[in-house]
Image: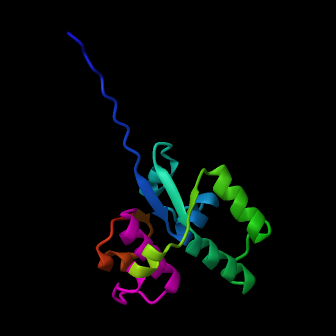
Amino acid sequence: MHHWTISLSIQLKFLLDSHTFLWFVGNDPQLSLNARVVIEDPSNRKWVSIASLWEITIKVSIGKLTLTDPVAVFLRRELLLNKFSTLDITLNHLDSLSTIPFHHRDPFDRLIVSQSIADSISVVSTDLAFDAYGITRIW
């Protein structure tokens, strides 16, 4: 008689909203404990959308956000240090974006919602407006 052992490792995926990414890397107390636990769990896969990196870059360039280093240096370092993957914008994301209702007017947040829908990925965000889209929001 043979005994087989099957080990299933389920890796959960999470897409960090722009503020979630910044609050986590800056150790900001506004980050919820639940969000921190999800992000710090090494078995979870964490993504940051190119849309969020674009939003952060724009905010730095217009003076609405100040980082400790030049934006490219800061983003590269924090993505690598925290083992965050970047989520590119694909045609599937744009297709989803073209069909979602306007519960939210912010173009970056709408793209994050579209990525969440198209890729079936939970979003880590404090933004309650995301709930209107029926996605899974962690906070």
Magenta span of residues: 96-121
The residue drawn where x is 74% and y is 83% is 61
The residue drawn where x is 72% and y is 57% is 77
Check the image and tell me how it is coloured.
rainbow
Q: Nearer the viewer, residue 15 or 127?
A: 15
Is 98 in the magenta? yes
Q: Quadrant of residue 14?
A: bottom left
Instruction: Give how far across and how far down residue 23 sits, in percent.
Output: 58, 64
**Number of marks drawn:** 0
| Drawn side of residue 15 relative to residue 77, left or right | left
Is residue 49 shown above or below 39? below
Residue farthest along the right direction in this orientation: 70
For the N terminus, the image quarter is top left
The residue drawn where x is 45% and y is 80% is 94
Is residue 112 shown above or below 80? below
Residue farthest along the left direction in this orientation: 1
Q: Quadrant of residue 22?
A: bottom right
| Drawn side of residue 94 relative to residue 67, left or right | left
Residue 68 in view, yes or no: no
The residue drawn where x is 63% and y is 59% is 25
